Image: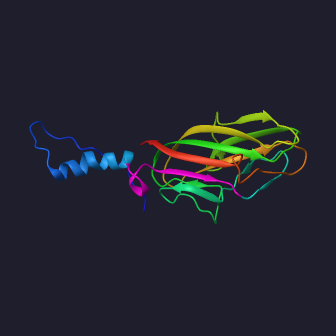
Amino acid sequence: MARTVPVIGSQSPGAFLTGALWNASVKAMADWLLGSGTSGVPRFRGYQTSVQSLSDNTWTPLTLDTESFDSDNGHSTSSNTSRYVVQVAGTYAVLGAAAFAANATGNRAARINQNGTSIPGSFVKTLAATASHSSAVACGAEVSCVVGDYIEVYGLHTAGAALNTSAGTDVACAMNVWWISG
C-alpha cells in the first residue's frame, strides 16, 4: 500500500496542544523526516555486484542486484532489477553511476530515465579511461513522480564491441533515490 506525506494540521489561536494533536501533527512529520525504515522519507540505494555485458553504442538499463537500503520496497533484486518503482508521489533526487571495465576505446555515458524516457539534462559523457583502468560516469536529476513511475540509470559505450560493466568494487554501477518534496 502506498504511503502519503503527513500533513501538519492548523489550529485555532488559543487551542491547547494535546498529546493526540502533537502525535498527529508534529511527531508524524518528524517521524517522516527523521525516521528509519518505512517511517522515514522514501530512499533507496542499489548497486551491481555481477557484471553486465553492454552492446556497443546502445543505451542499456543497468541491473542492480544488491541493495544497501530500500525503505519502501520499490526495487526488486529478482525482477526488473534495473528499476526503482515509486511508492510515494513527490519529487526525488536521483544519482546514478555507469561503471565500465577497462578499455581505452571510445566514449562512456550515463543518463537517468523515467518510465523508459530520458530525463533532459541528466546525460553525461566522457572519454574512455585506459586499457588497464575501469571507469565510471556519474549523473543526476530531480524527477517529479507519481506512484507507479519507475526510474532507471542507463549506460552507453562506444568501444566497438560488447563491453562489460565494472561491478562489485568501488567502481560499480549504482543508483541512489531520495524523496525530497511532495
Residue 40 position, x and y percent, is: 40, 51
48 in magenta:
yes
Residue 175 position, x and y percent, is: 62, 48
Residue interval drawn in magenta: 35-49
In-front residue for pair 47/91 = 47
**Colouring style:** rainbow
| Quadrant showing the N terminus | bottom left
* Residue positioned 47% across, 57% down in the render: 72
Instruction: Reply above or below: 164 against 77.
Output: above
In-front residue for pair 25/30 = 30
* Residue positioned 64% across, 49% down in the render: 152
Instruction: Reply above or below: 37 against 30.
Output: below
Residue 31 position, x and y percent, is: 34, 50
* Residue positioned 51% across, 60% down in the render: 73
| Quadrant showing the C terminus | top left
In-front residue for pair 120/72 = 72
In the shown orientation, is residue 143 left or right of residue 106? left
162 in magenta:
no
In the shown orientation, is residue 124 left or right of residue 6? right
Instruction: Reply above or below: 168 against 110.
Output: below
- Quadrant of res 98: top right
Count numbered badges in the picture.
0
As drawn, the residue found furthest toward the bottom would be 78
In the shown orientation, is residue 171 left or right of residue 12? right
- Quadrant of res 104: top right
Residue 71 position, x and y percent, is: 48, 56
